[in-house]
Amino acid sequence: MPLKTILKNHDTFTNNDYSNFDHSKNLPRHRWYYFKEGFSPLMVEEAINSADLKKNDLIIDPFAGSGTVSLVASLLNHKSIGFEVNPFMAFVANAKQSKAKPKQLLSYKDTIFSGIEKGAKSNLEAFSTFTQDQNRSKWLFNTEVLRAFEGGWQATEELPREIRKLYRLGLISSIMNNSNAVKDGKCLRYRKDWEEISYDKETFKYEFLDNLNIIHEDIENKRIKSKGQFIVGDVRKTIKNKIKNKFKLCITSPPYLNSFDYSDIYRPELFLGKFTNSNEELSKLRLKTVRSHVQIDWKKPVKTDFGFLYENCINEIVKRKEKLWNKRIPIMIQAYFEDMENILKELKYKAHENASLWVVVSTSAYVGIEVPVDLILADIGSKIGWNLEEIIVTRHLRNSTQNARRWNNGKATTKRLRESIIIFKGIT
């Protein structure tokens, strides 16, 4: 089928930011933790409306992130299962669906604020770049902020589980908003004039009170109807055994093929929340992720047959491998499509014959060569038995200036990457 026929614009989705988190910033429960890589709940609602779901039909998301799919499903009284390898993101997703009672939440307010005021020494004070010492020129958290956080965290120990999750989410959100660095693409970037900002216990308390008020307002006004299930672990393995009933709708956004390590960018939250306690544990977690980055030494792929589009782009990239910023990029691309093919196969086995599968992805580029991820995945899915309905182009993204400079002699390219929704309907 010609590419002009497959790749379509759509009045609802194109250029309306449905494939990113911007719509969620001010929405109840969604707004409890900003997750830049998430997609809009409006897209999930569109997918649900188009799937003609019955009461007991199952919705799944193999890459749940902060739980947008399951939260929308729960608010609409649909059953859902989300899979997420990052325990911090699974925690966020789970907390957003809390059925805690508003009055019960506020009954523990004084206890937590007392803990914040008292403070407590954190084990992270001597770890990595978390706090200041004589050998560091930059650090993530001023010591007073980290101790205020730790005091509040310890005060949550005896709280009921549902209440504890909400307070801990509020605490993590508050300390990240009192951090000297912010997330910027693939890394943490220190704020301008961060040394002069001087975050302290008072700024932390102010932020926490604001977060607590938002959470209280949302659990009072936006009640959960049917709480989703979350499974923490490597989806390449867990999806085989954890779906007992066939699903009717899958909406997901796998890691983009952009060498972005999601477990690394959320490293502060993983340590702050005690989800991981050492660099060794973090390395083990990173090995459980889809092979979309080169920052960890994962098992090498073996399969190479992913269609002519894959073959064409990988051959061109290999020809220019001396210009790559990392020599493992070609094998990373191969590994990514091997992982995605296996996941699409497992989804096929777990799908109702009339199931719909929505996959949000972006193309990528290395040394000036575009990798048409959406078209390659569409080809892979079709070959293993999914019926391709359409690929909707949602927006175009700015290309990596690093890749542009390395191939175009320092001149930035105007070519933009494509973000798309691949829609499969039914299996053969």
Image (tube, grey):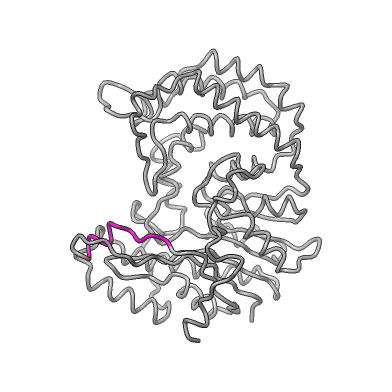
Pick the residue in front: 382 or 4: 4
Pick the residue in front: 108 or 32: 32
Q: On the picture, is 82 further left or further right than 321?
A: right
**Residue 374 pos. (x, y %):** 47, 71
**Residue 214 pos. (x, y %):** 65, 33
Q: Main secondary structure of the magenta part?
A: helix
Q: Is residue 416 above or below residue 384?
A: above
Residue pictured at 39% horizontal, 40% vertical: 280
Q: On the picture, is 390 further left or further right than 277?
A: right
Which quadrant of the structure image shows residue 386? bottom right
Q: On the picture, is 124 further left or further right than 133?
A: right
Q: How many marks?
A: 0
Bounds of the magenta segment: 397-407
Which quadrant of the structure image shows residue 69? bottom right
Residue 230: say if magenta.
no
Pick the residue in front: 91 or 177: 177
Residue pictured at 72% horizontal, 61% vertical: 58
Residue pictured at 49% horizontal, 67% vertical: 340
Q: Is residue 237 at all visible to an observer of this figure? A: no
**Residue 59 pos. (x, y %):** 69, 60
Residue 402: say if magenta.
yes
Q: Quadrant of the C terminus?
A: bottom right
Q: Is residue 179 above or below residue 75?
A: above
**Residue 37 pos. (x, y %):** 50, 52
